[in-house]
Amino acid sequence: MLGENDKGVQNSQKVSQAEDTGYTLTARWYLGLAYLKQNNIAQAREIFSSLKNTPSSYAKKAEEIHWQLDTL
């Protein structure tokens, strides 16, 4: 949101790769969004694909975004 996508990607990658800290899924969500802002469709698709299969509040929206990315 601050326009610092590269920094956001780096920070989100660190948190999302850590053991389940309680923030892992949230970090993956924002990592996927940052990838979209960078037009990195392949990485975004991978993130949203994994999120859509989780029991999280992001699952439904991730599934919708993943479906939209598949139609590109």
Image (spheres, helix red, strand yellow):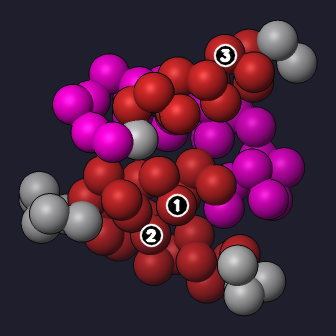
Q: Amino acid at mark 2?
A: Ser
Query: From the viewer's perspective, is 3 left or right of 12?
Result: right
Q: Position of residue 69 (x, y in %)?
A: 75, 24
Which residue sits at x=72%, y=87%?
2
- Occupied quadrant, residue 57: top left
The magenta segment is 34-57
- Occupied quadrant, residue 34: bottom right
- Occupied quadrant, residue 71: top right
Q: Secondary structure at mark 3?
A: helix
Q: Amino acid at mark 1?
A: Tyr
Q: Is disc 1 surrounded by few (<14), some (14 to 19) or many (20+) residues within 10 Å? A: many
The residue singled out by tag 2 in the image is: 12
Give the main secondary structure of the magenta stretch.
helix
Q: Amino acid at mark 3?
A: Trp
Q: Is residue 27 magenta?
A: no
**Looking at the image, residue 43 lies above or below residue 33:** above
Q: Is disc 2 surrounded by few (<14), some (14 to 19) or many (20+) residues within 10 Å? A: many
The residue singled out by tag 1 in the image is: 30
Figure quadrant of the N terminus: bottom right
The residue singled out by tag 3 in the image is: 67
Q: Which is more toward the observer, 6 or 48?
A: 48
Front position among marks 2 and 1 = 1
Q: What is the distance, in whole Å, between disc 2 and disc 1 at their CAs?
A: 7 Å
Q: Is disc 3 surrounded by few (<14), some (14 to 19) or many (20+) residues within 10 Å? A: some
In this rendering, does residue 17 appear at all?
Answer: no
**Looking at the image, residue 46 lies above or below residue 17:** above
Q: How many marks?
A: 3
